[in-house]
Amino acid sequence: MNERRRGEGEEGTRAYGFDTRAVHAGQRPDPYTGSRAVPIFQTTSYVFEDPGSAAAYFNLQEYGNTYTRIMNPTTAAFEERVASLEGGVGAVAFASGLAAQAAAFFTMLAPGDHVVASSALYGGTLTQLKHLARKLSLEVAFVDPDDLSAWRSALKPNTKLLYGEVIGNPGGNVLDLAAVAEIAHGIGAPLMVDSTFATPYLCRPIEHGADIVVHSATKFIGGHGTSIGGIVVESGRFDWSNGRFAVVAEPSPAYHGLAFYETFGMYGYLMKLRAETLRDLGAALSPFNAFLFLLGLETLSLRMAKHVENALGVAAFLSQHPAVESVRYSGLPSSPYHGLAAKYLPRGGGSIFVFDIKGGREAGRRFIDALSLWSHLANVGDAKSLVIHPASTTHRQLSDEELTAAGAGPGSIRLSVGIETLQDLIDDLDRGLCASQEVS
Amino acid sequence: MATHPSPAPSAVDPRYQDPRTIVDVLRSARSVAIVGLSPDELRASNFIGFYLRRHGYQVIPVNPKEKTILGETSYPSLSQIPVPVDIVDVFRRPEAVPAIAREAVAIGAKALWLQFGVISPEGARIAEEGGLRVIMDRCMKVEHARHLGRMHWLGFNTGVVTARRARELV
């Protein structure tokens, strides 16, 4: 066949590779200008062709743009690109990772529903589940994510969702995705995972049985610490008509009686997530941020390879250092998660991990104070190397017990290893570690 | 279909879901007879009829219980349609498909399209032997919107990856 290949959809031959899709998926160079970069459609709203078209868009009888709180062409390119990289049927972007996650929950859950979640989660997620979800009459049980029998014994007749992180923040637990997915599917519930620390470069949870994947795009997807955003991807494989999810399957009073799952099939959950939950919560991503995330995704593979290479180098250095008590990185053979990482993260265990410094809280303070190349701040997944003390910052709202359950001790230091020259990162850490042990 | 996007679970022979056939059938057709088209505006079949009409197809309802649907005359069966039919799009139970396929062959339709969940290997064989192209367990609206329409505007994974300048959207 002579015709030039125009995308797998038309050729039906081998699918394009991950790196190709990270650069191209989601964008069809626009017919009016031919702009090679994805245009930034910085508009609130869209002129309708005629009254009939407007009605068709609002009725969801036609795919059309109405208002940027619900959809935007720049944001859509970002959504489709992430969906392609994750192997999902589609995605919906949000103003932050926490907004994305909350919207994913509220689209499928109703008051009185029960959720089983890992106890080793990002502090913001823990407070969202403990306090916000409970205010909305959702019941949440937290379990040790490493203990499959704990997941099983926490199940109740009204359990509607299992939730965990692919790589736990900050403890670095690696979730046994296939096993937890099987437990979820055994009771007709979906498995939702936060894959922020893995990115689709390191792990594609849908391939291992997860039904919904959420990301804080703020981290590695953006990659440069410029923008806050989040995204929800769905596999399209979960049967929302199994009798347990009236909120997705039954006619919706919030959308003139539309039955989303019956009408849109495998796209039904995402359609409801956009047309109802995003519409009503209002946490829309800015088109400019979507543009920056698209730029970030173009180099995701290059950056992640370097992040992981540096992380392994830093972890190996720390594990030999006399001032270091322990290093918790799944990429090291000494990690209890090394086996799970080999299965689910074969390209590397990410670049965010915790180590414990000898001398506890005060040594930790002196260590951070002595660094000059690592930035002390509350973010991860930047091209720049970052460092933080969770007990006094991101996980500050947690009690000591909750902190330990989340995988960080009072003297733990969390690193987010960037893409600088490895030796420079090591030299700076070495200075800090030496300073940490000086007797004042 | 290649590996992305994840297709709906389908035990159907992949030749009935070949994207080249799908695009060619969608591009070459003018008229679509929808067997089992519902007059209820909230049913999937009605969404699809509405959508296809917006995109320039002549939609011909086939539903013995109705006089008109979407403002078009509804016929009790395919054989009573007085104009040429390019695609026969089926929203009926799989058991009903072989008889519909025989009728589709008899009226000289060009393609038999079986919607999500309408899986009938026998119906497909009858249609193929009669010279029709067959698409099975795929939604006509979704496939049109994926390949030729605007589905990418709502963040869905169309599977289309291209560096070629798009034609004006239809």
Image (cartoon, rainbow, N blue to C red):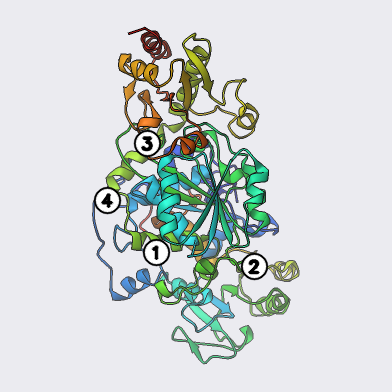
Tell if the residue under mark 3 belongs to the same chain as the one under mark 1: yes
- 1 or 4: mark nearer the eye: 1
Judging from the image, what secondary structure is the residue with disc 3 in?
A: loop
Give the numbered dot on residue A41: 4
Residue beneath label 1, please?
A275
Which quarter of the figure is the C terminus of chain B placed in?
Answer: bottom left
Residue beneath label 2, please?
B117
Q: Marks 1 and 2, how far apart in space? A: 25 Å
- 4 or 3: mark nearer the eye: 3
Q: Marks 1 and 4, how far apart in space? A: 20 Å
Judging from the image, what secondary structure is the residue with disc 2 in?
A: loop
Q: Marks 2 and 3, how far apart in space? A: 51 Å
- Subunit bearing disc 3: A
The image quadrant of residue A362 is top left
Q: Position of residue B7 (x, y in %)?
A: 59, 54
Q: Decide which of tag 1 and tag 4 comes sooner along the chain.
A: 4
- 1 or 2: mark nearer the eye: 1
Residue beneath label 3, please?
A396
On the picture, is A388 further left or further right than A141?
left
Q: Position of residue B17 (x, y in %)?
A: 62, 58
Q: Count neighbours of disc 2 (C-alpha within 10 A) and say few if under 14, some if 14 to 19, many if 20 or more.
A: some
Q: Is residue A342 visible?
A: yes
Q: Amino acid at mark 1?
A: Ala
A400 lies above or below B74: above
The reply to whether dot 2 and dot 3 touch (C-beta < 8 Å) is no
- Front residue of B106 and A334: A334
Q: Amino acid at mark 2?
A: Gly
Query: Which residue is rendered at x = 39% and y = 8% of the image?
Result: A434
